C-alpha cells in the first residue's frame, strides 16, 4: 500500500477544542523553522492554537490527542493568485502568449460563468483548493455580480479562508452586456455592493479584493476609481502586472505617457500595502524600487510563467531588493492548484536562471520555499498575525500530510526535516494532503480520492 494510513476515522468528526499529536514542521515568524518529530498542537474552542511543542511537554490540562503520526502537520498553504472560473480549462493552451491564450481559452469560458455556473463550480473549486493543501485562496472571479455572490456563499459554507473579487474590465472584455457609457459606473457599484455584503464576513475569514483585470482591459479612469474604492473601503486591490512581453508592449501602446507598466498602476493610486500584483516577471530596477517603496506585494506564479512561456522571474534579485513575495497557482495559467507544485517549479526555474548565468548566490532551499508558500502569503495579505505559521495565538489553519506518498522507497522515512520538505515539494503527490483545517474546522476536499 502506498499510504501509511488512508483513513483516520476520527478526523471528520473532530471539532475545536481538540489536540493533535503529529510530526510538526513550520516556519517561524521570528525567522527559522521549527520541527518536532513527536509534536503536540492544542486548538481551543475558538479555533486558535494555544500550544505547539513536543508531546513530552504537554500541558497538564491538555485533552487526549488524536495521534496522526507519522503524518506531518504544516501551516495551511496560501495561494495568492488564482482564477475561480478558469478551473475547467486548467491544462489547456500551453505555450501560447497570454493575450492569445486569454482570447482562445479564457474569455469564452469566463463569458459563461454566470450565477448558475458559479453555483455549480465554486463548491468543487473550494474543495479542490483544500485537497491541494491551500487553506487561504486569493482569487479573481468573472465579471458577473451574481456569480461572485455564489462564489462567496460557497466559500462561506465550505470554510476556506478566501479573498475574492469581481473582475472589472471596461475595454478588451468578454462581457456581452457591456455598455461603454455605463460600464465604469456599474462595475464600481457592483464591486462596492459586493464589498458591503462580503468584505470581513465571518470575523474576517472572507475578504474582498477590488479586481481590475489588468491595464490592457481597463482604462486609466477605471484603474483610478477602482483604487479609490479599495482605499475607501479597506478592501484589497489585485491585478496582473508585467507578465509577458506582448502584454507589456500593449500596455506601453495604451498608456504612452506612463514611464512603464508599474507607473500605470502608481498613477492610478493602485500601489500600497493592500495591493497584490500577479506575475511581475519583467520588472526594471525602477519598477522594482517603486513596488518595494510602496509596500506592494507580488504573487509569484512560476508554473503559469513557464506554461504560458511568459518568462522567468528574477526572484533572487527581487528578494534582495526587499520585495514582498508569496506564491500563486494562477489556475488556469498554471495547470495545477498545488502550491507544492509552485514551489517545485519555482525552484527549477531559479536553477535555470543560474545555469544561464542570470542569477548568482545561494539557491533558495526547501524551507525558503515553504516560507514563501505560507508566511510569505500571509504577510502579503497582512494577516501574518493570524495565519502562515503554527504558533500559539494564531488561528489553526493547518494541513496534515502523509509522507508515505512522497517516499522514494516504500517504508522509508526522512528523519531530517529539510529532507522531508524537499520530498514534499519535489515529489508532491495529489493525494498526500489528508486533512485541512481553517480555525480548527475541517475542510471538505482532502482525502476524497481514497
Ligand atoms: N492577464 C489578464 N488576465 C489574465 C488571466 O486570466 N490569466 C493570466 N495568466 N494573465 C492574465
Ligand atoms: Zn492570473
Image: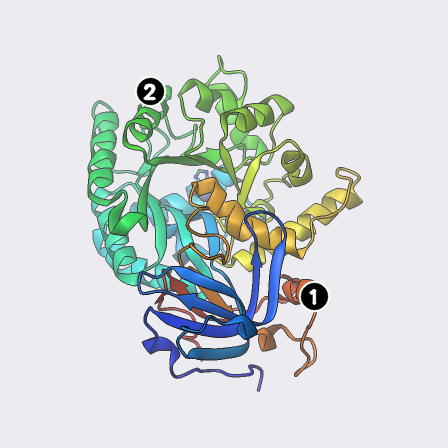
Q: Which residue lies furthest to the bottom in this view?
A: 1
Image vertical order of residue 267 relative to residue 79, above or below: above
Q: Nearer the viewer, mark 2 or mark 1?
A: 1
Q: In this view, does 412 lie to the left or right of 68?
A: right
Q: In this view, does 427 lie to the left or right of 181?
A: right
Question: How far across and how far down the image is residue 246, in percent?
Answer: 55, 31
Residue receiving disc 1 = 419
Label 2 neighbourhood size at 10 Å, few (<14), some (14-19), many (20+)?
Answer: few
Q: In which quarter of the image is ligand 1?
A: top left
Q: Is mark 1 on a helix, strand or loop?
A: helix
Looking at the image, the residue that sits furthest to the top is: 257
Point out the image quarter for the C terminus.
bottom left
Q: Badge 1, how many Cα within 10 Å: few under 14, some, many 20+?
A: few
In the image, residue 273 above or below residue 68: above
Give the x, y percent position of residue 87: 40, 56
Query: Is residue 267 among the parts visible in the rendering?
Result: yes
Residue drawn at (35%, 26%) of the image = 227
**Disc marking residue 221:** 2
Relative to 97, say whether 342 is above or below.
Answer: below
Q: Residue at x 70, y 68 (%)?
A: 416
Amino acid at each position: 500500500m502506498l499510504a501509511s494510513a488512508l483513513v483516520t476515522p476520527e478526523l471528520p468528526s473532530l471539532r475545536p477544542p481538540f489536540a493533535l499529536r503529529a510530526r510538526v514542521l513550520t516556519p517561524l515568524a521570528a525567522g527559522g523553522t521549527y520541527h518536532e518529530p513527536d509534536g503536540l498542537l492544542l486548538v481551543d474552542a475558538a479555533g486558535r492554537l494555544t500550544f505547539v511543542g513536543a508531546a513530552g511537554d504537554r500541558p497538564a490540562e491538555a485533552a487526549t490527542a488524536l495521534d496522526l503520526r507519522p503524518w506531518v502537520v504544516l501551516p495551511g498553504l496560501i495561494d495568492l493568485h488564482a482564477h475561480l472560473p478558469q478551473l475547467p480549462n486548467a491544462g489547456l493552451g500551453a505555450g501560447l502568449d497570454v493575450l492569445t491564450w486569454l482570447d482562445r481559452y479564457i474569455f469564452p469560458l469566463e463569458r459563461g460563468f454566470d450565477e448558475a455556473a458559479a453555483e455549480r463550480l465554486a463548491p468543487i473549486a473550494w474543495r479542490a483548493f483544500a485537497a491541494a493543501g491551500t487553506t487561504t485562496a486569493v482569487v479573481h472571479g468573472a465579471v458577473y455580480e451574481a456569480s461572485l455572490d455564489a462564489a462567496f456563499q460557497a466559500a462561506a459554507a465550505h470554510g476556506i479562508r478566501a479573498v475574492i473579487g469581481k473582475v472589472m474590465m471596461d475595454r478588451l472584455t468578454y462581457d456581452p452586456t457591456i455598455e461603454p457609457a455605463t460600464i465604469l459606473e456599474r462595475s464600481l457599484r457592483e464591486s462596492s455592493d459586493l464589498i458591503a455584503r462580503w468584505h470581513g464576513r465571518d470575523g474576517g475569514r472572507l475578504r474582498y479584493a477590488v479586481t481590475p483585470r489588468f491595464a490592457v482591459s481597463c482604462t486609466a479612469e477605471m484603474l483610478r476609481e477602482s483604487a479609490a474604492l479599495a482605499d475607501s473601503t479597506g478592501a484589497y486591490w489585485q491585478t496582473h502586472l508585467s507578465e509577458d512581453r506582448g502584454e507589456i508592449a500593449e500596455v506601453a501602446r495604451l498608456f504612452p505617457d506612463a514611464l512603464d507598466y508599474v507607473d500605470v498602476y502608481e498613477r492610478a493610486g493602485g500601489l500600497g500595502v493592500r495591493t497584490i500584483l500577479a506575475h511581475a516577471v519583467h520588472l526594471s530596477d525602477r519598477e522594482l524600487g517603486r513596488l518595494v517603496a510602496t509596500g506592494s506585494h507580488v504573487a509569484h506564479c512560476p508554473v503559469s510563467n513557464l506554461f504560458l512561456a511568459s518568462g522567468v522571474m528574477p526572484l533572487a534579485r527581487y528578494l534582495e531588493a526587499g520585495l514582498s513575495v508569496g506564491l500563486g497557482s494562477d489556475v488556469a495559467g498554471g495547470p495545477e492548484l498545488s502550491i507544492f507544485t509552485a514551489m517545485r517549479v519555482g525552484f527549477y526555474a531559479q536553477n535555470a536562471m543560474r545555469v544561464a548565468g542570470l542569477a548568482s548566490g545561494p539557491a533558495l532551499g526547501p524551507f525558503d520555499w515553504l516560507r514563501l508558500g505560507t508566511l510569505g502569503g500571509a504577510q502579503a495579505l497582512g494577516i501574518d498575525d493570524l495565519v502562515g505559521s503554527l504558533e500559539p495565538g494564531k488561528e489553526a489553519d493547518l494541513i496534515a500530510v502523509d509522507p508515505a506518498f512522497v517516499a522514494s522507497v516504500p517504508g522509508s522515512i526522512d528523519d531530517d526535516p529539510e529532507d522531508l520538505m524537499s520530498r514534499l515539494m519535489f515529489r508532491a503527490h495529489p493525494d498526500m494532503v489528508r486533512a485541512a483545517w481553517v480555525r480548527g474546522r475541517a475542510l471538505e476536499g482532502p482525502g476524497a480520492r481514497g
